[in-house]
Image (cartoon, helix red, strand yellow):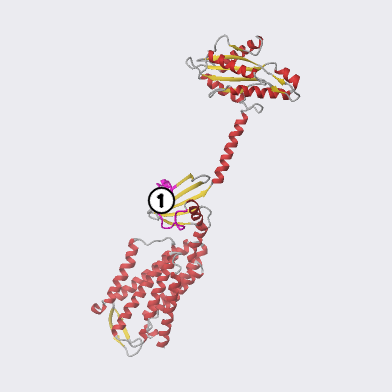
Amino acid sequence: MHEVLALAFALAALLNGAMAVLTWRRRSATPAATALAAAFASLALWSAVGVPVNFALPRSAHAVLVQSSFVGVLGAVVAMYLLSRFVADPHHRPGRVEVAHLVVVPLALLAAVATDPWHHLVFDRVVPLDGPPWFEAHLGPLFWVHTAWCYGLLAASYGHLGRAWWRRPAAVRPQVALLVLGGLVPTAGNLLVIGRPDLFSGQDLTPLFFTVTALVDARAVLHRGLLQVVPVARAAVLENMQDSIVVVDAGGTVVDVNPPGRAYLRARRPDLPADPVGLRASQFLTARALGELPGGHLAYELEHGPGLHLDVHVTAIRDRRGRDLGRVVVGRDITELVETRRHLERLRAQLAEEAVRDPLTGLHNRRHFVPAAEALVAGASGQRPVGVLVVDVDHFKRVNDAHGHAAGDEVLVEVAGALAGTVREGDLLARTGGEEFALVLPGADEESVAARGEALRAACAALAVPLVAGGRVRPTVSVGTAVARGGADLARVLGAADGALYAAKTGGRDRVAAAAVAAA
């Protein structure tokens, strides 16, 4: 019988050891894998102790094995508790009080076990036997303290698993329920071991019961994918996103970068290592991305080099206590969107400009001229007058009648070009009617206006517009001028200039006439 038990303990130790290695390799997925690996390692030690106690050993060797079994017991219970915490909350990080409780109490109990020969508070006495298990231990008060603490921790584990079943997604509940059911096995078995040791020939089979629990937990965690809730979510949110994502810890060190982020870094900063994890984020993130985060979030557009625009979102990462854990920087390439937006803005500006442009001559039309001229005339003063010229092509109807409207259009285009050649910065020129044009000259007094009028008249008189049928048309223009000073309005000034234009026409055309009285 005892040889069979020794073999069972040996197989359990090997199985737990192999599972500890397997689970340890999955530790990068989630802290729950680390806790499960620690549980398997503790159970491997606890089970291994059960092998030699089936053989005759000196009392000193038996005492060492008993002390080692307590290491396995306490390690397994603490690991199972942490496993429940991480299953309930994959982002749980033990606080200082919790860590102190899980470390100090086991160490104190192990110290009591190690010094038991001097105080006998763990085992009241140990009686040698003639056969396996060779020694019978009578339990002391500290053993029951140890047992109560272990069961209290296991009860807390069940509580966390119960809350996990209630709060976690429905897809996770079957696995959590499996963990709870698996935990009942060692609880029931240990109660039988303590209450009826005669049923198991004095052997402590609790590690075998815990091995069953650990295997059930491993099935829930590894085979049924409980630990993969976090990795799959990360893959969906981080690895498969097209945006560049950089995770920075509270100290400013890069702790994670997704593939698009790495590709962006390789393209923009080939001098940096291919794997930026561990670098200072300031080496490739802007000061704005690493600066203050009012409200825990910041969004802005960044033009990063020629032809690259990013929509940047920076979000603070904080724990439940509000402590700063770091930040997530997400950069989305919006270059195409920005270029499209700029193209639309240019198109809109072009359409707006075309709406106030004369399609034949390219000059501004009356829609643009009136409000612009009103603004200029309204700013006239005694010290800064504003000159206005009204220009009309002479005998334009004769050109249309004799040579056709195409020839007339060509004359208007040439006249507009001649007028535009006389324009200076700040002047306003427009085609205001069929063959009529107007200029507004800020800062021009009567003498300047007369000189400018004569210059543009001469420029037009020098034109010789070729005709399709042969020959040329030599157009002339008549010009009327007026000068606005303080208190003038556009209608009054244009009226004065029109009067002067009429005088130029009746005076023989191809001449400049000034308004008899300056507009005031």
| 129 relative to 208 in the view: left or right | left
- Compared across the picture, whether 175 is left or right of 41 comes to right
Image quarter of residue 501: top right
Q: Quadrant of the N terminus?
A: bottom left
Q: How many marks?
A: 1
Position of residue 222 relative to residue 475, above or below, is: below
Residue 332 position, x and y percent, is: 51, 49
Q: Badge 1: few (under 14), some or many (20 or more) residues near its Cα, within 10 Å?
A: few
Residue 317 visible in the displayed image: no
- Residue 73 seen from this side: yes
- In magenta stretch: residue 445: no
Q: Which residue is mark 1?
A: 282
User: Is residue 277 part of the magenta span, yes or no?
Assistant: yes
Callout 1: SS? helix
**Residue reaching furthest to the left:** 118
Residue 448 in picture, x, y percent from top left: 53, 15
Q: Looking at the image, which is closer to me, 42 or 24?
A: 24
Q: Amino acid at mark 1?
A: Ser
Residue 124 position (above or below residue 84): below
Please provide percent x and percent y for residue 344: 59, 39
Residue 15: x and y, percent? 44, 78
- Main secondary structure type of the part rendered in magenta: loop
Of 278 and 168, nearer the camera is 278
Up/down of 249 relative to 137, above or below: above
Q: Please tell me which residue is depicted at 32% across the width and 64% down the height of the picture.
A: 100
Query: Which contiguous range is marked in magenta?
Result: 270-297
